[in-house]
Amino acid sequence: MNLSKYKEKIPEKIYALIEKRGFLELRPCQTKSINAGLFQDKNLLVCTPTASGKTLVAELAFLNAILHDKGKAVYVVPLRALASEKYKTFKRDYPNINTAISSGDIDSADSYLERYDLIITTSEKFDSLIRHKANWLRQVKTVVIDEIHLLNDPRRGPTLEVLITILRNKLKNMQLIGLSATIGNPEELAEWLDAKLVIDHWRPIRLDKGVYLDGEVEFK
């Protein structure tokens, strides 16, 4: 879908930013997210294939929190390496957004984060920040949880579940954006999150399934 067709639905500053970055077309999951209330602070659970455009949905959400709602945004990832990758990417793509990373010592309040608008962190570190009662938490408008299907992970799942529960209890007006390529029960999870479910099966490269035997692949 041509970006210009959504100009009236996207806040002016955000539209100018993504247009400047060269996004002239929106992918299906992005238009569905906008129509589901992305810019009306609705909670969203976005379940679409890898490389289908989920990250831009998250970017639109945190830009809306920072530029339109004048609050902070937190981007939660499962691994420190992924936090570092996202930090570098967002610093490059949005140099005028004050972006910080917090993924180190989980027994620290990291008070310096009060000076930043976008904070990249892991679920364990964010849980620690909440337990340290960081003063800036009350300014958080949007929380993005990448790989939210890890709620089912026996090691990381409990921390993530408790984190989401505490956030929803403490930040009544928070917008929650969950991202995943693989969720077995998306309807149930969306209901628990009180979120609009965005499902789409479009992918930029066709995926074919086949069986390899004796040097040959037989595609279904």
Image: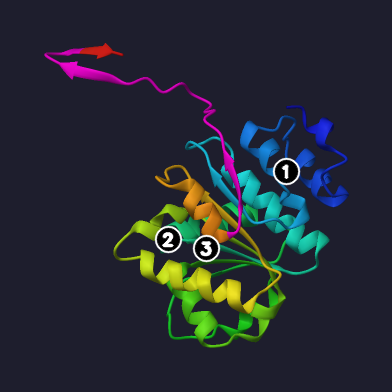
Residue 189 location in percent, x, y?
Answer: 49, 54
Q: Earlier in the sequence, mark 3 or mark 1?
A: 1
Give the residue pinned by disc 1: 34
Amino acid type indicated by mark 1: Ile
Q: How many marks?
A: 3
Is any atom of residue 93 visible in this view? no
Q: Nearer the viewer, residue 135 or 98?
A: 135
What residue do we see at 52% from left, 60% from top?
192
In space, the residues marked 3 and 1 are separated at their CA atoms by 21 Å
Tell me if mark 2 has few (under 14), some (14-19) or many (20+) residues whose alpha carbon lies within 10 angstroms of its own.
some
Quarter of the figure that contains the C terminus = top left
In space, the residues marked 2 and 1 are separated at their CA atoms by 26 Å
Q: Nearer the viewer, residue 22 or 201?
A: 201
Q: Is residue 31 above or below residue 39?
A: above
Give the residue pinned by disc 3: 76
**Residue 104 image label:** none
Camera-near label (3 vs 1) is 1
Q: Earlier in the sequence, mark 2 or mark 1?
A: 1
Residue 197 on the magenta segment:
yes
Give the residue pinned by disc 2: 78
What residue do we see at 65% from left, 86% from top?
135
In space, the residues marked 3 and 2 are separated at their CA atoms by 7 Å
Q: Which residues are magenta?
A: 194-216
Q: Is residue 169 above or below residue 2?
A: below
- Displayed quadrant of residue 8: top right
Amino acid type indicated by mark 2: Pro
